[in-house]
Amino acid sequence: MTTTDHHDNSDTGLGWTADEMMTVAAARQLKPGTSCFVGIGLPSTASNLARATHAPHHTLIYESGCLGARPDRLPLSIGDGILADTALAVITVPDVFN
Amino acid sequence: MARLLSLRAAVAELVHDGDMVALEGFTHLIPFAAAHEVIRQGRRDLVLVRLTPDLIYDQMIGMGCARKLVFSWGGNPGVGSLHRFRDAVTTGWPTRLEVEEHSHAGMANRYVAGASGLPFAVMRGYRGTDLMKQTATIASITCPFTGEELTAVPALNPDVTVIHAQRADTDGNIQMWGITGVQKEAVLAAKRSLVTVEEIVDVLTPVPGQVILPTWAITAVALAPGGAHPSYAHGYYDRDNTFYVQWDQISRDRDTFTDWMTHHILPQPETLAS
């Protein structure tokens, strides 16, 4: 998991952090067969957690134009090479937003 | 036809004080070497345009190159704030910085309109956000056919667009692949353009997913191997994620930032000498 200014990585005393719990809760919302426009940070972690667990065919769409990315490690940015390498298709930014 | 120039000569000729300058590259192929040359040549009062200012504009803002930023999503991806950008906006250090904030969709459409020779672009965006109240270059428009309320954004036509690509051939045709972002539109929208490249080859061997920019669409090409670092060049080197994380500490403090830039960026790299 990445660290940012606004993240809450403090230990709750229960063996998990608030960020981790939010990530798990978000992942559970992503049902098998759905697709998700993925933001970086916790949303990306949640989306890849869903793909690694209950929704292996859940489709990830990153704003960099990487459609159906299947990274085997978490990216730091929405445009890491691992996303382009594993994507079904890489399209342009005007295409992905229009 | 594009001319092959040294990076130093290309920046000296194409980037002027007060220009609207777009240095584009969406996470991938960010033209850092060109930005560093702009910093070394001491350009001032630039209107910097970019989707995601990234470290490249944090450095240029902190070194006093910019008077205005036209942008979307101003952060260090996956890490946090851009501290030099934040300092300029909140305290005016090292100079006051005017900001014009858009969404990625808005910025992309503004370049498309500019590249198409149109005065503005129409889109479904911004509705339900506060950006319409903050940014003068976002307006409502009614569809003449359906009556639907849509959003209009004016074209962007930079004085100069600078991008980085994997390869050029000796005629100045440009080849890039991987995440190609909005670079084609940003180049075609601009009055002048500079493309830095990893290498110059005799023949551009086709690559899946490639974008070719023909030489007649480009003003100048400059060789700059490694010129996208700490971003990356697909097929050449990976994104330096460690540096993106380190930048948070380098940039947080004014003196640490200035010292780092003085030692790492201001000295002229031998590889770029003309």
Image (cartoon, helix red, strand yellow):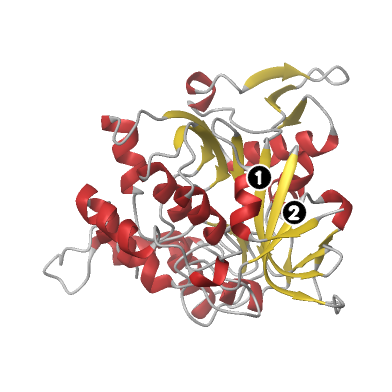
**The image quarter in which residue A45 lies:** bottom left
| Callout 2: chain | B
Earlier in the chain: of badge 1 and badge 2, it is: 1
Question: Mark on residue B251?
Answer: none
**Residue B29 or residue B133, whichever sits in front:** B29
Q: Position of residue A9 (x, y in %)?
A: 22, 63
User: Do the dots labelled 1 and 2 sit on one chain?
Assistant: yes
Q: Which residue is mark 1?
A: B13
- How crowded pointer 2 is (Cα within 10 Å; few <14, some 14-19, many 20+) is rated as many
Q: Most extreme residue toward the bottom, as rendered?
A: A72
* Identity of the residue drawn at 40% across and 50% down: B59
Q: Position of residue B260 (x, y in %)?
A: 29, 60
* Identity of the residue drawn at 23% across and 47% down: B254
Left/right placement of residue B36 relative to residue B82 reads right
Amino acid type for the residue under numbered disc 2: Ala
* Identity of the residue drawn at 57% across and 77% down: A82
Q: Is residue A70 above or below residue A59?
A: below
Left/right placement of residue B179 relative to residue A79 reads right
Q: Could you say whether the residue bearing mark 2 is in a helix, strand or loop?
A: strand
Q: Which residue is mark 2?
A: B220
Amino acid type for the residue under numbered disc 1: Glu
Q: Position of residue B72 (x, y in %)?
A: 53, 41
Q: Position of residue A76 (x, y in %)?
A: 44, 68
In this view of the protein, can residue A38 be seen by the observer? Answer: yes
Give yes or no for contact between labels 1 and 2 (Cβ–Cβ under 8 Å). Answer: yes
Left/right placement of residue B210 relative to residue B136 reads right
